[in-house]
């Protein structure tokens, strides 16, 4: 699951909400590993780092979304029906 999450994190088509969800997933994974006392210290640190990266990426994406809202949000809706 972590590799799929990492690929999604690096995806250019990620929304700020999705990036925050990934940050939470990585943080929860790291917490579970710490609580279980897993021997893999390196893996836990990787999850913690990925959580921080996802959090920072969410902020960058949110800033970009403020500057360039999705196409549907930027254009006004038509108030008339198109007749063909």
Image: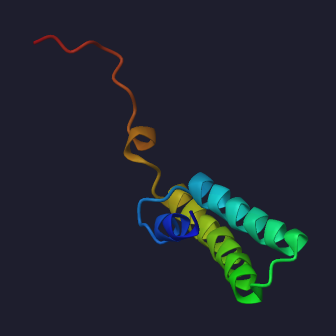
Q: Residue furthest front?
A: 39
**Looking at the image, which is closer to me, 39 or 19?**
39
How many numbered marks are there?
Answer: 0
Q: Is residue 76 left or right of residue 29?
A: left
Query: Which of the 4 image quadrants contains residue 78?
Result: top left
Above or below — where is 18 with respect to 74?
below
**Looking at the image, which is closer to me, 27 or 66?**
27
Query: Which of the 4 image quadrants contains residue 80?
Result: top left
Q: Is residue 9 left or right of residue 51?
A: left
Q: Residue at x 68, y 69 (%)?
A: 55
Q: Residue at x 52, y 55 (%)?
A: 15
- Residue 4: x %, y % from top left: 49, 64
- Location of the C terminus by quadrant is top left
Q: Residue furthest bottom?
A: 42
- Location of the N terminus by quadrant is bottom right
Q: Residue at x 69, y 72 (%)?
A: 51
**Looking at the image, which is closer to me, 81 or 41?**
41
- Residue 2: x %, y % from top left: 58, 68
Q: Residue at x 69, y 76 (%)?
A: 47
- Residue 72: x %, y % from top left: 40, 39
Q: Residue furthest left?
A: 84
- Which scheme is used to colour this image of the protein? rainbow
């Amino acid at each position: 699951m972590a590799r799929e999450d990492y690929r999604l994190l690096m995806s250019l088509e990620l929304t700020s909400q999705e990036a925050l969800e990934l940050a939470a997933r990585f943080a929860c994974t790291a917490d579970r590993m710490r609580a279980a006392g897993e021997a893999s210290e390196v893996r836990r640190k990787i999850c913690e780092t990925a959580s921080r990266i996802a959090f920072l990426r969410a902020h960058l994406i949110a800033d970009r979304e403020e500057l360039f809202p999705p196409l549907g949000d930027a254009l006004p809706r038509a108030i008339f029906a198109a007749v063909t």
